[in-house]
Amino acid sequence: MYISEITSLLSASFTGEDIDIKGVSTIEEATSSDITFLSNPKYTSKALHTKAGAIIVKQKLKIDMPQIIIGSPYLAFARVVSFLYQSKKHIPGMSKHACIHANSRVDTSATIYPHAYIGRGAKVGPNCVIYPGCFVGEDVVIGDNTILYPNVAVYDGCEIGKGCIIHAGVVIGSDGFGFVWDGQKHFKVPQRGKVIIKDDVEIGSNCTIDRAALTTTHIGSDVKMDNLVQIGHNVTIGDHTIIVAQTGIAGSAHIGKSVILAGQCGVGGHITVGDGCVAGARAGIANDLPKGKVVSGYPAIDHNKWLRAQNIYKKLPDLLKRIKAIEGRLKDLEKD
Amino acid sequence: MYISEITSLLSASFTGEDIDIKGVSTIEEATSSDITFLSNPKYTSKALHTKAGAIIVKQKLKIDMPQIIIGSPYLAFARVVSFLYQSKKHIPGMSKHACIHANSRVDTSATIYPHAYIGRGAKVGPNCVIYPGCFVGEDVVIGDNTILYPNVAVYDGCEIGKGCIIHAGVVIGSDGFGFVWDGQKHFKVPQRGKVIIKDDVEIGSNCTIDRAALTTTHIGSDVKMDNLVQIGHNVTIGDHTIIVAQTGIAGSAHIGKSVILAGQCGVGGHITVGDGCVAGARAGIANDLPKGKVVSGYPAIDHNKWLRAQNIYKKLPDLLKRIKAIEGRLKDLEKD
Amino acid sequence: MYISEITSLLSASFTGEDIDIKGVSTIEEATSSDITFLSNPKYTSKALHTKAGAIIVKQKLKIDMPQIIIGSPYLAFARVVSFLYQSKKHIPGMSKHACIHANSRVDTSATIYPHAYIGRGAKVGPNCVIYPGCFVGEDVVIGDNTILYPNVAVYDGCEIGKGCIIHAGVVIGSDGFGFVWDGQKHFKVPQRGKVIIKDDVEIGSNCTIDRAALTTTHIGSDVKMDNLVQIGHNVTIGDHTIIVAQTGIAGSAHIGKSVILAGQCGVGGHITVGDGCVAGARAGIANDLPKGKVVSGYPAIDHNKWLRAQNIYKKLPDLLKRIKAIEGRLKDLEKD
């Protein structure tokens, strides 16, 4: 694809020769037919020595190479990747090695791979791809253009929106964790609710999302979840929220819109996290957070406070020494 | 179901009209044919405005509505849910799309869904349900009335008791993590033991439970495990213990009876946790705990101590300032 | 197997009668036909009372029992286990209940179980075992003697070396977590790279290993990974590295050779961890580490420093009291 074609799609301009770009790569590994990008100025010196055929930059570099100049080079690069590489094509139709209930409705444009199971009353929308080993329970609804990678299990009655990507091994709609002691054993609180996942959601491998006890566990649109994330029953997550790997959200927590929870975070049960909050890696949120708070630590506190406390933490042995020294000096003074 | 029928099953009494209850719901979402409950007095004001048809309470509320009065409203409510909603029915029999070894023994009342695999010598008890994609290895024993949700893998020789619920993606009996350096590479210590899971155990989605090296990884009866929990080899867990999501228990740890490990906890290898201990969220138990201890933090300490320490932790910058001020004042005094 | 045969294979000597050993067991549970071992001197008193038929020790014990004396009793024991118990045999061939693309290449000595799926262009080497429910994507390469336990998913284009053991539910090659805000929603950065896993790697149940954005997520040879480990995109891991359960490594981190990351650790994005580093349980590595560092805590610091700081942490309430007392005494002195 010629640079002029790329820039036309990006609505951007370029300098240098209008060469034919065959691939994309990193600054370090790009060859003369690749395009690369510079987003973080930290890597400028590397960019000056790249062997790429062209580069996407925010400000023109002093190198003799075709350059696309654009406000957000990383976004432009991601779009270029999507121009150059077509998504995988799947042959529509239902494999004869899949088990598809006669009373389900699978769109003819959908692809159902072997060993997939589609239960009674389930609906699978146009252009969906259901990989091998997936389980789509009774009355499940899967919106248009959604992909279920291998071995995804969607329990009965759950709903997934349009344009979602559900990675391998994800479990949607398993029972929430609810028991009550009956004097002799844990009595299981029946989990009668469901999970609703809105449009354009991506869920990483082996995540687990529990169905609500009575109502709905709700995942807003454009939510992006990394691998091995746990979502408890009755949780609601606002649109555009980002949840990084191995984070866990306990039952009945409410996460606002455009929140970012970094890796290995935890959110306590019944907690409300306001829109736009950001939690640093491993934050353990034990109290409600108003809109826009940036927190770290466990229990999570203001991020800057945490940075300062954390810094002193390392020096605790020194602090103790200073206190002992002070006590000694005090004693001397008191003797006088 | 009429309230009188419900109270007869609960051995409870009620006040008000004997209406027909069609469903259950939360205080907020209940409609006039639903029953709801009030357990936490915090929500009393909400209960006073519920649109439910009836309510289960501990003490009679001043509202004009049928009320079931009982000592444990939440337990009663859970039981009412189980009265009103029948468990899913499965048609007994083995799908012709399942692979069931000729030398296995599957009870005729069990349901084996398509794409399930039952290995040589395996036994599947009466009324069991084996969902699609499950792997039941050689000589595995699965007790009566146990459910394996989709894509559960039970390695050879492991045993699961009666009335268990194993959620999707759970792995039981994978090799324990044991290696010994042989001078050039990690030599794998063969894992020849197994996993035994007793009756009435529930295991959440995508949990992993390793087989013992030589003996048995043992999960006691009525143990309830949330999602993404990791159990190392040789671990033993006492009856009625509760393990919340994303907790990990390292090899050869012994967890007593009726222990509660909250979310994202860790227990170190070879550690013993006494009966009735409670670990707060994220506790990291690095030392043996006697019976009944309540701990938090990492390394886990007495919960109340942790609360106090945690509280001061936030004020470390302030503490440092105070120490500096003290040092200044001391210097002044010493000058005199 | 006679002790003399065992010692001949181990190149070790023994004292006592040359009895026939039928099995292996722990010091506590061994019976007269079992061999056991003593590695940790802590258990010497137990060893003196074992009912085992023979024991592997470092130094001869004062007991009347055949003893194999060798430098590394645990390694010797592991080897004896491998002598006594043969690995499971699998009948080579492709199940007619598996789906194997006509344009794949599966060695005739490999075993493909029912409900496995082998995609177009995939290569499965000699003696491989592919359990039920596995998904082997297009152009995937699986080296000789590698085992994929049930429900493993290997996305298109990924490569697994020889002699690897991949436990149930592992996902290899799912999309890395990369998005860029386009002003209205998160634009997905296409993940065009792959995962390469070298020889003799073992990966625990339900681990997730993401494909690189453009290049390769690389797992070195003889790497051993416990259960529920998360590896982000573009990560590289050096040979012989050990990663214990529930650890997460964020995108583009580089982990050296022979590193040990204990349970529930985290490594931040773009971090470099030098060869031979050791991270204690739950360490959160937020900064580059030079070779051979031993760290703990979050953010991870020198392990011994952490031990001291952690120790004082518990005493923070006491420290605060001392500071208050000092302030009072100072005030008194200043009054004078």
Image (spheres, coloured by chain):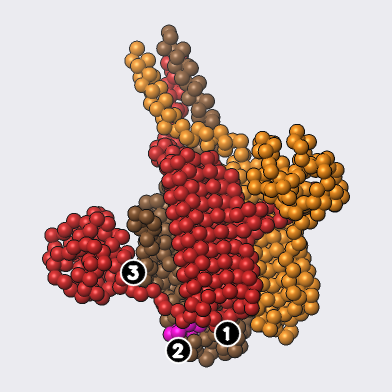
Chain colours: A red, B orange, C brown
Classify mark 3: residues with Cα within 10 Å, few (<14), some (14-19) or many (20+): some
Left or right of C71 in this view: A187: right
Residue B223 visible? The answer is yes
Q: Chain of mark 1?
A: A
- Tell which of C24 and A283 is nearer to you: A283
Give the x, y percent position of residue C23.
69, 75
Q: Pointer 1: residues within 10 angstroms few (<14), some, or many (20+)? A: few
Residues at discs 2 and 1 both on one chain: no
Check if residue C204 falls in the magenta segment. no
Q: Secondary structure at mark 3?
A: helix
Q: Residue at x 69, y 48 (%)?
A: B31
> Is A187 left, or right, of C228 in this rendering?
right
Q: Chain of mark 3?
A: A
Q: Nearer the viewer, mark 3 or mark 2?
A: 3
Residue bounds of the magenta highlight: C118-125
- Residue at left offset 66%, top offset 53%: A214
Q: Which mark is residue C103?
A: 2
Between C55 and B276, the residue placed more toward the observer is B276
Q: Looking at the image, which is closer to me, C99 or C94?
A: C99
- Measured as percent of width and height from the top left, residue C150 is found at 58, 75
A193 shown above or below A322: below
Q: Mark 1 sits on what residue?
A: A96
Number of numbered labels in the structure image: 3
Say what amino acid the circle numbered 3 marks: Ser
State yes or no: discs 1 and 3 in contact (Cβ < 8 Å).
Answer: no
Q: Amino acid at mark 1?
A: Lys
Q: Chain of mark 2?
A: C
Quarter of the image for residue C31 reads bottom right
Between label 2 and label 1, give the one nearer the viewer: 1
